[in-house]
Image (tube, helix red, strand yellow):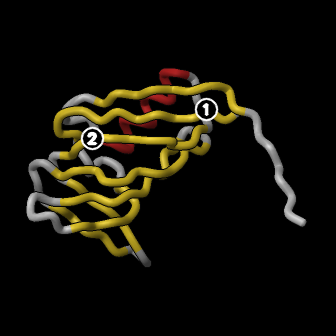
Amino acid sequence: MSTVTPFETAGTLVVRLKPNEDLVTGVEAACREAGVARALVRSGVGSLVDAALSYGEGKRVDVTGPGIEILTLIGEIRDGEAHLTGTIADQEANIFGGRFVPDANPICITLELVLEVVA
């Protein structure tokens, strides 16, 4: 028999990041401004100028844009720190995946993100 442990939510936070804001540090700043320390990423859509993803043991891939599309975006904000993972596509439709590196993923046009705030 499985066990389900419910958790309380404290609402929803919708974030819009503007051009040249960094994905990771921008989400962290928006959460700080809203007084949110813990949240789950429920959806996100947007594009990046350039992108940097980490994967494996200290490996990193840098993708040159402009116009890097975010295909998937998942993650959480834990104690004010964003842990964001996703997949992206470059202009030639090459797909890359990993954890978004802070200060290395500038927003191209906008990024909209829906967070479920955890109590």
Q: Which amino acid is tagged 1? A: Val
Q: Is residue 20 left or right of residue 30?
A: left
Q: Seen from this angle, which residue lies furthest right?
A: 1
Instruction: Answer with the quarter of the image where residue 106 lies.
Output: top left
Q: Quadrant of the N terminus?
A: bottom right
- Determine crowd level at label 2: few under 14, some 14-19, many 20+ residues with C-alpha closer than 10 A: many
Residue 46 at what x, y percent from top left? Answer: 27, 40
Badge 1 marks a residue whose secondary structure is strand
Mark drawn on residue 117? 1
Mark drawn on residue 81? none
Question: Which residue: 59% across, 45% down?
Answer: 78
Q: Which amino acid is tagged 2? A: Gly
Question: Which residue: 22% across, 50% down?
Answer: 69
Question: Which residue: 34% across, 27% down?
Answer: 16
**44 or 81, which is in the foreground?**
44
Q: Seen from this angle, which residue lies furthest front?
A: 1
Residue 23 at what x, y percent from top left? Answer: 33, 42
**Total residue callouts:** 2
- Above or below, 28 against 64 in this view is above
Instruction: Answer with the quarter of the image where residue 26 lies.
Output: top left
Residue 33 at what x, y percent from top left? Answer: 48, 22
Badge 2 marks a residue whose secondary structure is strand
Question: Which residue: 57% across, 42% down?
Answer: 40
Q: Is residue 73 left or right of residue 49?
A: right
Mark drawn on residue 46? 2
- Above or below, 43 against 53 in this view is above
Q: Seen from this angle, which residue lies furthest bottom?
A: 57
First in sequence: mark 2 or mark 1? 2
Q: Is residue 14 left or right of residue 76?
A: left
Q: Quadrant of the C terminus?
A: top right
Residue 50 at what x, y percent from top left? Answer: 17, 52
- Determine crowd level at label 1: few under 14, some 14-19, many 20+ residues with C-alpha closer than 10 A: many
